[in-house]
Amino acid sequence: MSRLPPLTGLLPTAGGKLLIQMAERKFDTLAELIYWSYANLQMADAACSMHKEKYDRVCYSIRAKAYKSYLIGSWHISDLYRQQIEKLQKSNHSCAYCGRVFATPKEATVDHIFPRIKGGTNEMENIVFACKTCNSSKGDRDMFGWFLEHFGEFPSIYLTANYLKKIYLYAQTNSLLDLPLETLNELDLPFDWHCIPTKYPEPTYFVIDYK
Ligand SMILES: [Zn+2]
């Protein structure tokens, strides 16, 4: 991953809270928040594929269709993730977070996206290869919140897709999807719902992923 220019408006504030300003849109439930975030990610992915520099009407209609399709259940959150797995497999020789290429396989450590201490599993979908520096820096923090604060940048489409999908599946399994967002504050979760992004960078921000 190459260094990207800083992303104004999305940078973390002290304490790691308010990482991302909530969009004007109001979300009542965790499901709505996840679907909106994923629909934005889908728009970013489509815009990159179409080599667009900025989001336009075509992109916004893709996002609108995705959001609606997730809400009514005709599309599923894992679809985009699956498309990205292949790209990840090509990048196993480098840190999933900072992109540093490992000189020897021993430099690669296994990092759990949902921390083990918070119930994260050893399944492949919860694992990325990371350098020791990133691994110990992230610790048991929310992956997305840590990444933004640590690098001052938005994670790749793959990492974001993986993160959102994991939250979705966790929320589905634990019947959290229809809960009002405020009630989530009282639960000990392997993610921080405040970190779920609702505003995404322009497509040009993502196109240098996976080169
Ligand atoms: Zn690293």
Image: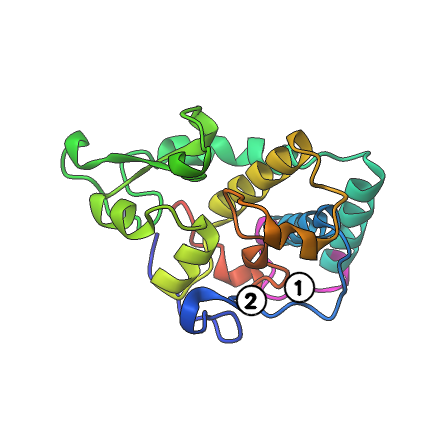
Question: What mark, if any, has residue 209 been given in the picture?
Answer: none
| 178 sits left or right of 47 in the view | right
Magenta stretch: give its range. Answer: 46-58
* In-front residue for pair 210/7: 7
Q: Which of marks 1 and 2 is nearer the N terminus?
A: 2
Label 1 sits on a secondary structure element that is loop
Residue 117: horizontal and vertical position, in percent? 39, 37
Residue positioned most to the front: 186
**Is any part of residue 50 visible from this angle?**
no
Q: Residue at (45%, 33%) from the top-left corner?
A: 120
Q: Nearer the viewer, mark 1 or mark 2?
A: 2
Q: Residue at (39%, 34%) from the top-left corner?
A: 116
Q: Residue at (56%, 60%) from the top-left corner?
A: 203
Residue 82: horizontal and vertical position, in percent? 57, 31
In which quarter of the view is residue 124 placed? top left
Residue matched to label 1 = 55
| 90 sits left or right of 167 in the view | left
Residue positioned most to the top: 123
**Is any part of residue 195 visible from this angle?**
yes
Residue matched to label 2 = 20
- Asked whether residue 123 is drawn in magenta, I would say no
Residue positioned most to the right: 72
